[in-house]
Image (cartoon, rainbow, N blue to C red):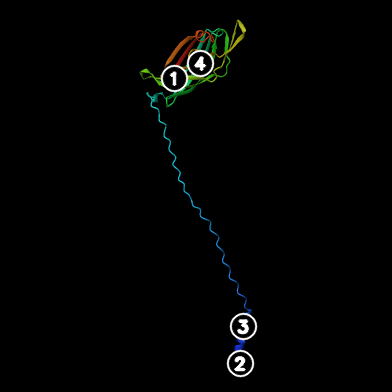
């Protein structure tokens, strides 16, 4: 009995050793995954911008007269009539000056003039398709008695602009054609390139001048002019 037990013990020991020898080898432990490096921290600079200064409003000039009733658009009707010329007896330039009164007392605007010619019983014609144009500038000035005067200057668009007129009469049906810078010559002779007038609705001025005496012979005849102010 003892011998049998000893054999069983020996057999178990042999089987145990065989099981240990046949067991698969243990898998090696996985290496830990390294953590990615963190980016270097860049310090953030906070820049405070200086506040933009608020522009101060432009002060309105102090004027010595009440401007509000004068603001806006004014119209000056200006007509020139050249009479008793050498070739043409009645040449007329009729135009309107548009004047704008600004809040600072300055003046701006423009002007256009159209030409007509009369000489019965002859057939006459003004051959210029475009009007004569000028720009306006100036300023208001106080005058005596509390009145306000507009000081105006005309700047011709073309100071050498000619006026072309045609005349055909029974005595010479072939006709005569004349081209001369008569308008601006007449305006200079009448001293109307720069003039003043009171800003008063209905104001009218009429005058005449002998052109042959004041224009150095460039023009002949008599100039009749009229200015009328309205709104």
Q: Residue at the location (54% across, 12% down)?
A: 117
Q: Nearer the viewer, mark 3 or mark 2?
A: 3
Q: According to the image, label 1 marks what residue?
A: 151
Q: Nearer the viewer, mark 4 or mark 2?
A: 2
The C terminus appears in which quarter of the rendering?
Answer: top left
Q: According to the image, label 3 marks what residue?
A: 17
Mark number, residue 195: none
Q: Secondary structure at mark 2?
A: helix
Q: Secondary structure at mark 3?
A: helix
Judging depth in this view, the residue of 97 and 151 nearest the camera is 151
Q: Residue at the location (52% across, 17% down)?
A: 113
Q: Earlier in the sequence, mark 3 or mark 4?
A: 3
Question: Mark 3–mark 2 contact, CB under 8 Å?
Answer: no
Q: CA distance from mark 3 to mark 4?
A: 137 Å
Q: Nearer the viewer, mark 3 or mark 4?
A: 3
Badge 2: few (under 14), some or many (20 or more) residues near its Cα, within 10 Å? few
Q: According to the image, label 2 marks what residue?
A: 4
Q: Secondary structure at mark 4?
A: strand
Q: Earlier in the sequence, mark 4 or mark 2?
A: 2
The N terminus appears in which quarter of the rendering?
Answer: bottom right
Q: Earlier in the sequence, mark 3 or mark 2?
A: 2
Q: CA distance from mark 3 to mark 2?
A: 20 Å
């Amino acid at each position: 009995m003892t011998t049998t037990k000893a054999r069983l013990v020996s057999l178990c020991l042999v089987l145990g050793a065989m099981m240990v020898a046949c067991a698969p080898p243990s898998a090696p432990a996985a290496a830990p995954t390294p953590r990615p490096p963190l980016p270097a921290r860049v310090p953030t600079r906070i820049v405070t911008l200086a506040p933009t200064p608020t522009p101060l409003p432009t002060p309105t000039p102090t004027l010595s007269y009440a401007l509000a009733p004068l603001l806006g658009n004014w119209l000056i009707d200006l007509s020139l009539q050249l009479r008793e010329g050498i070739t043409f007896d009645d040449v007329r330039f009729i135009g309107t000056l548009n004047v704008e009164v600004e809040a600072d007392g300055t003046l701006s605007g423009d002007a256009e003039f159209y030409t007509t010619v009369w000489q019965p019983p002859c057939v006459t014609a003004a051959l210029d398709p475009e009007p004569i144009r000028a720009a306006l500038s100036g300023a208001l000035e106080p005058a005596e008695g509390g009145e306000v005067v507009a000081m105006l200057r005309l700047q011709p668009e073309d100071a050498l602009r000619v006026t072309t007129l045609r005349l055909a009469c029974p005595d010479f049906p072939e006709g005569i054609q004349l081209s001369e810078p008569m308008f601006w010559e007449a305006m200079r002779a009448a001293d109307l390139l720069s003039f003043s007038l009171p800003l008063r609705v209905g104001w009218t001025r009429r005058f005449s001048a002998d052109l042959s005496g004041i224009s150095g012979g460039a023009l002949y005849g008599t100039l009749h002019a009229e200015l009328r102010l309205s709104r």
